[in-house]
Image: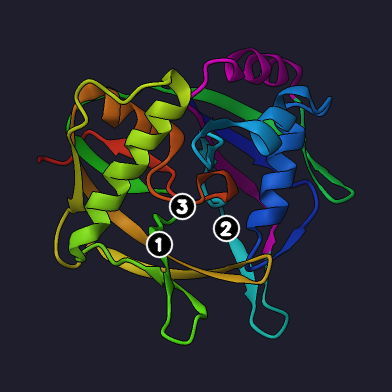
Amino acid sequence: MKYGLRFRCEQPIVLPVNYNKILQAALLWWIDSSGEFSGFLHDVGYSVEKRKYKLFTFSNIKGNYIYNAQNKTLTFDDEIFIVLSFYNDDSHGCILENAAAGKPIRFGRSFVPLIGCFAAEEEYRPCAVDTVSPITVHSTLEKPDGKRLTHFYEPDDRDFSKLIRSNLIHKTEAVYGQKPGDDSFSIRPYNSRGTRRITTRYNGMIIKGWQGRFIIDGSPEMIKMALLSGIGDKNSIGFGCVLQNNRCQI
């Protein structure tokens, strides 16, 4: 399921520009402060071969903010909105319980009250999607001197869609122990000027991703995995979260 969470900042919340790790920790605490389900999401997930997939993702923080160029911080002092998406339906009970209790989200010592929660209804069919956190796709290459290089693919690269499809197949295999019956899937930009590159730092790593509108096509099984678990790499640290856009013609 996919959920929209709205919180009200009763006092200013100051976050670094690269806040993915902070937001991930805040959301895991909000989902399950006991640590049982959130621990599974963060530490366990689903495995196939040497790969591990958490099968959840989240958006950037949406809301008005003041940017401090000197300190490289964002100050939120009004309402904020976050999208949270899970492939596993086990999340539903936790979300309902927290929504009914009006559980606040915690950033450090600041508790931000929940003022709204809704479930997003999406159809698993070819559609347009809008990113609410950047899509990133990468390969690790070895240079002639033996050093390793991370290469991030752009939406116009031939391997961008190919690698995303492969990622979705591996995720399906990790959950069900077998590959999807129909593994057709493709993704492309909605138009030639519809994407922009976003560069983020996470734990000292530089991650390059893409924001914008895309067209996804393929089997219902593959589209469901893409919409709920996230598109591309590094979903569980806040990349590849998308919302279906039913107003766009494809």
Check residue 97 for magenta coloring.
yes
The residues tagged by marks 1 and 2 sit, at their Cα atoms, a distance apart of 31 Å
- Range of the magenta residues? 75-102
Examine the image and state in which quarter residue 99 appears.
top right
Left/right placement of residue 231 relative to residue 92 reads: left
Give the mark nearest the N terminus, 2 or 3: 2
Q: Which residue is mark 3?
A: 133
Answer few, some or many: residues within 10 Å of disc 1's Cα (few below 14, many 20 plus, some between 14 and 19).
many
Q: Tell me how many marks there are.
A: 3
Identify the residue at horizontal 23%, vertical 23% (top origin).
220
Left/right placement of residue 63 relative to residue 165 reads: right
Q: Report the front residue among 36 and 30.
A: 36
Q: What colouring does the structure picture have?
A: rainbow
**Element assignment for label 1:** strand
Identify the residue at horizontal 69%, vertical 28% (top origin).
40
Give the mark nearest the N terminus, 1 or 2: 2
Is 70 situated above or below 115?
A: below
Q: Report the front residue among 157 and 14.
A: 157
Q: Which residue is mark 1?
A: 138
Identify the residue at horizontal 23%, vertical 62% (top origin).
194
Asked if the residue at tag 3 contacts the one at tag 1, i.e. Cβ–Cβ closer than 8 Å, the answer is: no
Instruction: Assign the C terminus to one quadrant of the image.
Output: top left
Q: Position of residue 37 (x, y in %)?
A: 71, 23
Left/right placement of residue 203 relative to residue 241 reads: right
Q: Position of residue 133 (x, y in %)?
A: 46, 52
**Element assignment for label 3:** loop
Q: Which residue is mark 2?
A: 64
Q: Going by the picture, which residue comes out furthest to the right?
A: 109
Q: Position of residue 118 (x, y in %)?
A: 52, 23
